[in-house]
């Protein structure tokens, strides 16, 4: 007989950098990062998604059609401190590479951790957008990041 | 002076003759002399590329970055249905069943193939392993990586997936893959340097129609390819951006 375990669920208002907000259902359940895969996406210079690979579609829980044209902050989990994303934008807007550990929100409210790298796409000397590649993080880095982000909320 | 063609040293030994046939095929189609120079060292090849000794290169994605962004090469085509993936394997007798079970101090057998090594190291990150806490054995080729695992001289090995798949059934039966990358967008690319400018259009045409020519089909088969696909400048830039996110 299996025990009927209920995953803790909560409603949270997520406020974005641009002043917009949404209420999301947050489910306290981690979806493991798939071995051997890279999640790849590209955005325009304002952070709107222009390319999503299949691993991104699979892990985010959104369809490709829902992702393309959406702001990348659709993945923002309320447990991520705003200052982490400020650091990301400050770095890539200077034309530099950013790397960090991120807890991402899936469409169904569950989450997954990634090690993310974002680089600016420079074409003929002009910034055209950004490429973000996510890979599997270690458990120790996830624990360190959880502890750090809790102090920054 | 003939133009110089080279091939990333990670090609399978079985396909050496295919690259010579390819060179002959190109010379006949384009009506120009081309010299094929093969290397068994990535470092030596890179040095010669930097010294301007190469005009046409079937490059691995890692070197494509240098050729395009630093040396002004242009991507003409990529091999059809052929992406570069990395396999991390252990001996069939190993107790290790997942990358996360590998411990600091593990002995890693690898090659100097920059793509495979980079991808392999990325897949070890989930075990908190990096070059500071493992012992590296850099070997000449994937057969030696496999032998190192089989003899118990290494705990884990990196292979180009194609290299792993082309090992004999006997050797493969003595190993067990822990993980195989599934990236799908990193691949080799045929790049032409500035000296090839006037022949670029004819070369692109020759590559894309090779599959329609009975002789071309034979050459492709010997190279282990099924054909060529055109590659736009943006496709190339995208792949290079992606590689840039993977290198520290």
Image (spheres, coloured by chain):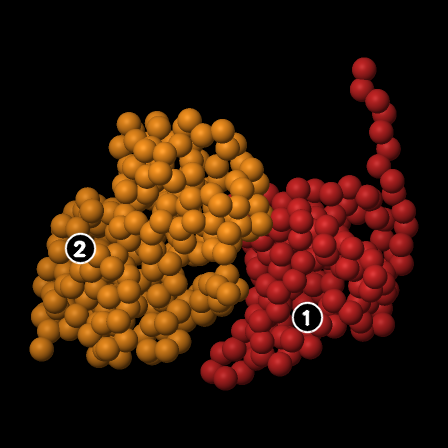
Quarter of the image with the N terminus of chain B in it: bottom left
Badge 2 crowding class, 10 Å Cα cut-off, few under 14, some 14 to 19, many 20 or more, is: many
Q: Which of A120 and B173 is in front in this view?
A: B173
- Residue B154 locus on image (x, y percent): 38, 40
Q: How many labels does the image show?
A: 2
SS class, disc 1: helix
Disc 1 marks which residue? A88
Q: Is mark 2 on a helix, strand or loop?
A: helix
The CA span between labels 2 and 1 is 45 Å
Specify few, some or many for label 1: CA neighbours under 10 Å numbering under 14, 14-19, or 20 or more. Answer: some
Q: Quadrant of residue B112?
A: bottom left
Q: Which chain does the numbered disc 2 sit on?
A: B
Which residue shows up at 74% across the image and 67% down it? Answer: A84
Task: Determine whether, in the image, residue B113 is placed left or right of residue B186.
Answer: left
The answer to whether one can see residue A104 in this image is no
Decide: marks 2, 1 in contact (CB < 8 A)? no
Q: Where is residue B189 in the image (x, y as percent from the top left)?
A: 33, 61
Chain A display color: red
Q: Position of residue B84 (x, y in %)?
A: 39, 51
User: Residue B89 falls in which quadrant of the image?
Assistant: top left
Question: Which residue is found at the position 16% from the left and 64% from the top?
Answer: B37
Q: Is residue A97 visible?
A: yes
Residue furthest out toward the top: A1
Q: Mark 1 lies on which chain?
A: A
List x then y, in percent, for residue B54: 22, 72
* Residue occupied by mark 2: B19
- Chain letter tied to orange: B
Q: Viewer-nearest of labels 2 and 1?
A: 1
Give left or right: position of B115 versus A60. left
């Amino acid at each position: 007989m299996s025990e009927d375990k209920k995953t803790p669920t909560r409603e949270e208002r997520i406020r974005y950098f641009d002043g917009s907000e949404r209420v999301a259902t947050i489910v306290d359940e981690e979806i493991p990062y798939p071995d051997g895969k890279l999640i790849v996406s590209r955005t325009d210079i304002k952070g709107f998604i222009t390319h999503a690979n299949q691993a991104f579609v699979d892990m985010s829980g959104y369809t490709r059609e829902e992702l393309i044209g959406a702001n990348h902050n659709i993945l923002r989990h309320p447990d991520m401190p705003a200052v982490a994303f400020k650091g990301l934008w400050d770095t890539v807007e200077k034309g530099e590479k950013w790397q960090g550990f991120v807890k991402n929100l899936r469409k169904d409210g569950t989450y997954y951790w990634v090690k993310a790298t974002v680089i600016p796409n420079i074409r003929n000397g002009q910034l055209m957008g950004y490429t973000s590649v996510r890979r599997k993080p270690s458990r120790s880095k996830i624990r360190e990041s959880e502890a750090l982000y809790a102090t920054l909320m | 002076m003939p133009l110089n063609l080279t091939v990333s040293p990670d090609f399978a030994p079985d396909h050496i003759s295919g690259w010579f046939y390819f060179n002959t095929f190109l010379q006949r189609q384009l009506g120009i002399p081309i010299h094929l120079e093969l290397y068994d060292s990535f470092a030596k090849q890179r040095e010669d590329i930097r010294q301007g000794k190469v005009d046409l290169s079937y490059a691995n994605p890692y070197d494509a970055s240098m050729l395009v962004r630093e040396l002004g090469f242009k991507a003409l085509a990529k091999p059809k249905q052929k992406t570069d993936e990395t396999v991390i394997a252990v001996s069939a007798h190993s107790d290790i069943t997942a990358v996360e079970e590998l411990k600091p101090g593990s002995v890693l057998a690898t090659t100097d193939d920059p793509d495979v090594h980079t991808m392999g190291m990325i897949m070890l990150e989930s075990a908190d392993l990096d070059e500071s806490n493992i012992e590296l054995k850099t070997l000449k080729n994937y057969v030696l990586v496999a032998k190192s695992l089989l003899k118990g001289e290494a705990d884990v090995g990196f292979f180009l997936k194609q290299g792993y798949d082309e090992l004999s059934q006997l050797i493969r039966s003595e190993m067990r893959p822990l993980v195989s990358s599934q990236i799908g967008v990193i691949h080799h690319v045929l790049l032409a340097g500035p000296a090839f400018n006037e022949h670029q259009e004819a070369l692109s045409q020759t590559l894309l129609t090779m599959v329609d020519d009975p002789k071309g089909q034979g050459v492709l088969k010997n190279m282990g390819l099924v054909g060529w696909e055109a590659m736009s400048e943006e496709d190339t830039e995208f792949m290079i951006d992606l590689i840039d996110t993977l290198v520290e």
